Image (spheres, helix red, strand yellow):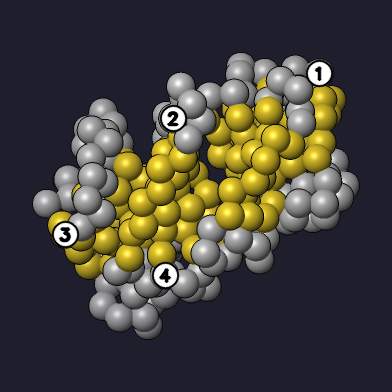
C-alpha cells in the first residue's frame, strides 16, 4: 500500500516494530518520528522537534539520531516516552543497529559502535577511524559472523574493520579517488556471504564474493 501524510515530510529511515507497525524518521521538525499501523493506515504515535536523520532499534527501545546534532534520543517503544540521550563527539550522519549494538557514522570521518548491555543498560563504546566521511550518508554493515564491519567511504573505497580491536584488515577499491563520488551503502548477504556496495556517480552496484 501507499501511506502518505503531508505533515511527515521526507523519509530518512524506516524500520518494522512487528508485522503491522512501521516507524519512519523525517528531517522535519513536526512529526519527526512516526509510528504507523499499516493495517489501518493510522498513526499510532508521533514524536516532534527531533529533525531525525536516522532511526534504529535494540530490543524494546528506539534510537533516533538528530539532524546536524551529536545527540541520539532513546525512546521506549511501549510507553512512547523519551527515556534519555546518548551524546557523541561529532554530528551524526547515519544510524543503524544489530542485535545489541548501534552503529553511528559521524561527519569527522569516524564511526562508533555502541553496545548496550541487556542486564544493566551500560554502554560500551568503540571508535572506528581511517575511512573518509564528512558530507554524505555512508551506511556500514556487519558480516554474517558479526566479526567485521564493512564501512563505505567518500574516497571510493570500503574499509573492513575487525570489531574486537577496530583494526582495518582490508580495503576494497570501488573506484579510484573522489571523481566518481562517495560509496554510500554496503549490504551483506547472510545466506551467500556476498558484499554489495553502491553509490558512485555512474550508478553502479558492485558485488564481492567475500571481503578478503
| Residue named by callout 2 | 117
| Residue named by callout 4 | 109
Q: Secondary structure at mark 4?
A: loop
Does 197 sit above or below residue 178?
Answer: above
Return the mark for residue 22.
none
Mark before the other along the chain sequence, 1 or 2: 1
Q: Nearer the viewer, residue 83 or 32?
A: 83
| Residue named by callout 3 | 170
Q: Is residue 205 left or right of residue 39?
A: left
Tell me the crowding category of disc 2: few under 14, some 14 to 19, or many 20 or more residues within 10 angstroms, Cα based.
few
Residues at marks 3 and 4, CA–CA distance in whole angstroms:
17 Å
Mark before the other along the chain sequence, 4 or 1: 1
Q: Nearer the viewer, mark 3 or mark 2?
A: 2
Residues at marks 3 and 1, CA–CA distance in whole angstroms:
47 Å
Residue occupying image coordinates x 82% and y 30%: 45
Image coordinates for residue 188, horizontal then vertical, percent: 31, 41
Mark before the other along the chain sequence, 3 or 1: 1
Return the mark for residue 40.
1
Q: Secondary structure at mark 1?
A: loop
Mark before the other along the chain sequence, 3 or 4: 4
Q: Nearer the viewer, residue 85 or 155?
A: 85
Q: Nearer the viewer, mark 4 or mark 2?
A: 2
Residues at marks 1 and 2, CA–CA distance in whole angstroms:
35 Å
Mark before the other along the chain sequence, 3 or 2: 2
Residue occupying image coordinates x 75% and y 55%: 51
Image coordinates for residue 119, horizontal then vertical, percent: 46, 22
Q: Quadrant of the N terminus?
A: top right
Q: Secondary structure at mark 3?
A: strand
Tell me the crowding category of disc 1: few under 14, some 14 to 19, or many 20 or more residues within 10 angstroms, Cα based.
few
Tell me the crowding category of disc 3: few under 14, some 14 to 19, or many 20 or more residues within 10 angstroms, Cα based.
some
Residues at marks 4 and 1, CA–CA distance in whole angstroms:
42 Å
Amino acid at each position: 500500500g501507499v501511506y502518505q501524510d503531508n505533515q511527515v515530510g521526507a523519509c530518512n529511515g524506516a524500520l518494522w516494530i512487528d508485522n503491522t507497525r512501521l516507524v519512519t524518521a523525517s528531517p522535519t521538525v513536526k512529526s519527526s518520528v512516526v509510528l504507523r499501523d499499516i493495517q489501518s493506515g493510522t498513526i499510532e504515535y508521533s514524536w516532534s522537534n527531533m529533525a531525525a536523520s536516522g532511526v534504529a532499534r535494540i530490543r524494546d527501545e528506539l534510537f533516533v539520531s538528530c539532524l546536524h546534532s551529536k545527540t541520539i534520543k532513546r525512546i521506549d517503544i511501549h510507553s512512547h516516552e523519551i527515556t534519555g540521550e546518548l551524546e557523541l563527539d561529532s554530528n551524526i550522519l547515519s544510524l543503524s543497529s544489530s542485535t545489541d549494538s548501534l552503529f553511528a557514522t559521524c561527519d569527522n570521518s569516524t564511526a562508533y559502535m555502541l553496545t548496550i548491555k541487556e542486564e544493566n543498560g551500560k554502554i560500551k563504546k568503540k571508535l572506528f577511524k581511517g575511512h573518509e566521511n564528512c558530507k554524505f550518508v555512508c551506511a556500514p554493515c556487519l558480516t554474517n559472523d558479526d566479526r567485521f564491519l564493512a564501512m563505505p567511504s567518500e574516497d571510493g573505497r570500503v574499509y573492513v574493520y575487525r570489531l574486537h580491536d577496530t583494526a582495518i584488515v582490508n580495503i576494497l577499491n570501488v573506484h579510484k579517488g573522489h571523481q566518481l563520488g562517495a560509496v554510500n551503502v554496503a549490504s551483506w548477504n547472510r545466506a551467500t556471504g556476498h558484499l554489495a556496495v553502491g553509490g558512485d556517480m555512474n550508478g553502479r552496484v558492485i558485488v564481492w564474493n567475500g571481503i578478503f
